[in-house]
C-alpha cells in the first residue's frame, strides 16, 4: 500500500498558515516577508520629506513640481526567511512499527515545508542519522 503523505483537504488547511519571524535581521535577502522597516521593496508605504543622505532615485519629482519641496517615496522592506527542517531518519524511528514515528515525522516535515514554500520562503529539509554516502557525517540531504 503506497504511503499517502498529504491529502488535498489537509493541504487546503495548510494554505491559511504562514510563517513569521520575530527578527528582521535577515541579511538583506529580498523576498515576500514585509517587515515594519523602510526598505527597497516594491510596495509603496509612505512619503517622507527629503533629508541629506536619502537616495535621489526615490525622490518623487511630481510632488516636487506641485509643492516645490522634495519628498522621498518609502517602501516596505521585503525579506525572505530560510527555514531549516531537521528530521530524525535513524533506525529507531522505524521501531516499533505500529507507532509509525517516521511516517508522522515525515508528514510534519512536509507540512511545515509546504507552509514555508507557499509563504515564498527558502526550505532545506535535512535528514539526520540515516545512512549516507555524503561527506557530512550523520546527515542525509
Image: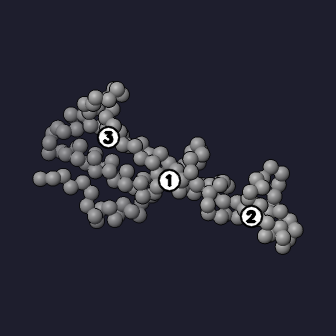
Question: Which quarter of the figure has residue 4?
Answer: bottom left
**Residue 129 has which mark?**
none
* Residue 87: numbered disc: 3
Mark 1 and mark 2 in contact (Cβ < 8 Å)? no
Q: Tell me the element at label 1.
A: loop
Q: Secondary structure at mark 2?
A: strand
Q: Nearer the viewer, mark 2 or mark 3?
A: 2
Q: Nearer the viewer, mark 2 or mark 1?
A: 2
Residue with the mark numbered 2 = 47
Identify which residue, 67 or 25, lies in the foreground. 67
Q: Give the left or right position of residue 36, taking residue 58 as reference.
A: left
**Point 65% across, 64% down: residue:** 44
Can residue 108 be seen? yes
Mark 2–mark 1 distance (CA, rounded to whole Å): 26 Å
Residue 73, image x, y percentages:
72, 62
Which residue is rendered at x = 32% and y = 50% of the image? 110
Relative image position of residue 54 (x, y in whole percent): 78, 53
Identified at 22% across, 38% down, the residue is 93
Q: Mark 3 or 1 closer to N-term?
A: 1
Q: Residue 1 in the image: x percent, y percent?
A: 12, 53
Q: Secondary structure at mark 3?
A: strand
Dot 3 surroundings within 10 Å: few (below 14), some, or many (20 or more)? many
Distance, label 3 to label 1, CA atoms, is 21 Å
* 74 left or right, relative to 93: right
The numbered disc on residue 20 is 1
Q: Is residue 48 visible?
A: no
**Residue nearest the observer in this picture, 116 or 133:** 133
Q: Earlier in the sequence, mark 2 or mark 3?
A: 2
Amino acid at each position: 500500500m503506497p504511503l499517502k503523505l498529504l491529502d488535498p483537504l489537509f493541504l487546503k488547511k495548510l494554505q491559511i498558515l504562514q510563517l513569521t519571524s520575530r527578527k528582521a535581521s535577515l541579511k538583506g535577502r529580498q523576498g515576500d516577508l514585509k517587515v515594519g522597516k523602510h526598505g527597497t521593496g516594491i510596495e509603496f508605504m509612505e512619503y517622507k520629506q527629503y533629508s541629506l543622505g536619502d537616495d535621489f532615485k526615490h525622490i518623487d519629482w511630481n510632488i516636487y513640481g506641485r509643492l516645490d519641496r522634495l519628498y522621498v517615496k518609502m517602501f516596505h522592506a521585503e525579506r525572505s526567511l530560510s527555514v531549516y527542517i531537521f528530521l530524525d531518519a535513524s533506525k529507531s524511528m522505524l521501531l516499533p512499527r505500529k507507532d509509525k514515528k517516521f511516517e508522522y515525522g515525515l508528514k510534519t516535515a512536509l507540512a511545515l515545508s509546504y507552509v514555508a514554500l507557499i509563504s515564498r520562503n527558502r526550505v532545506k529539509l535535512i535528514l539526520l542519522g540515516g545512512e549516507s554516502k555524503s561527506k557530512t557525517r550523520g546527515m542525509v540531504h
